[in-house]
Image (cartoon, grey):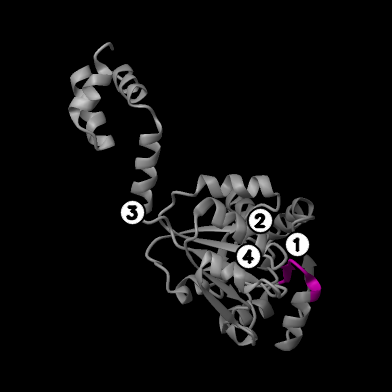
Amino acid sequence: MANGRLFVCPTPIGNLEDITLRVLRVLKEVDCIAAEDTRHTLKLLNHFEIQQTLVSYHEHNKEKRGRELLDKLQEGCAIALVSDAGMPGISDPGQELIQGCIQLGIPVEVLPGATAGILALVASGLDNSRFSFEGFLHRDKKKRRERLEQIAREDRTLVFYEAPHRITDTLEDCIKILGNRRGVLCRELTKRYEEFIRGSLEEILNHFLGQQPKGEMVLLVAGMSTEDRDALIQAEIEAVPVRAHLIRLIEEGMDKKEAVKMVAKERRMSKREVYQESIDL
């Protein structure tokens, strides 16, 4: 085992059999394990009969503990970084520690393993050739909606993580801002009660009416279709008066004749109709 190295170790997201042999070996051989929740990680270590030193590294102590871990790494220690489930640094603590190692020239070795977002994407049946990972949306309603508005025209499949007590609010906001698109909600991945709820976003929301959402969730939403994008662009064009449309193009440097031609094309009008609006310009 090489010293002075950070090992980023993904842990199972549900089924303990999903841990890799390589991760188990590293967890045994490092000098200590930096864990998001030491009690949670202790259960994992006990299951695989691993005795190891644990130190906490989480969202609330990451600055102070991060500096301490970097000092240990510079002194030559080998440290494994784990979160409660999945890949550290992906919607979990770890990114800052990894960045600190890179800045100090400390080797970082990332081991492959379970990642809920990728598993859910592949299982969803939605287009996975291109996707946008959004992680957790903000807890604040206003900020959550602002982010959804920013990505409303995204044509890639959207991947969100969400907590069960916020999933209905998130679905309602998605329907309001993104529209009633196709979606898949993946619940309790790799666990006994794994479930995939497929349909429109309204159908997924209706699934939870009258029952309490439970378990860790990944929500996948289809990207904006070409047809919907074209319809939205056309609606925005037509919402602007013809005269204002002409003035904008002329102010941008287009001569009046070309502006008339362009406006007619974009608004699907006859050039004669548009010309009448341009006479006194």
The answer to the question of whether label 3 and label 2 lie on touching residues, with beta carbons closer than 8 A, is no
Q: In which quadrant will I find the C terminus?
A: top left
Return the disc, 1 or 4, that comes first in the chain's sequence.
1
Mark 2 lies on residue: 97
Q: Label 1 amino acid?
A: Tyr
Q: Nearer the viewer, residue 99 or 31?
A: 99
The answer to the question of whether label 4 and label 3 lie on touching residues, with beta carbons closer than 8 A, is no
Instruction: Report the disc number at residue 88.
Output: 4
Alpha-carbon span between mark 2 and mark 4: 10 Å
Q: Label 2 amino acid?
A: Leu
Say left or right for 267 vs 205: left
| Residue at 39% from the left image edge and 67% from the top image edge | 127
Mark 3 lies on residue: 227
The answer to the question of whether label 2 and label 1 lie on touching residues, with beta carbons closer than 8 A, is yes
Expressed as whole percent of the image width and height from the top left, the position of residue 64 reads: 79, 52
Give the vertical position of 150 relative to 258 (above or below): below
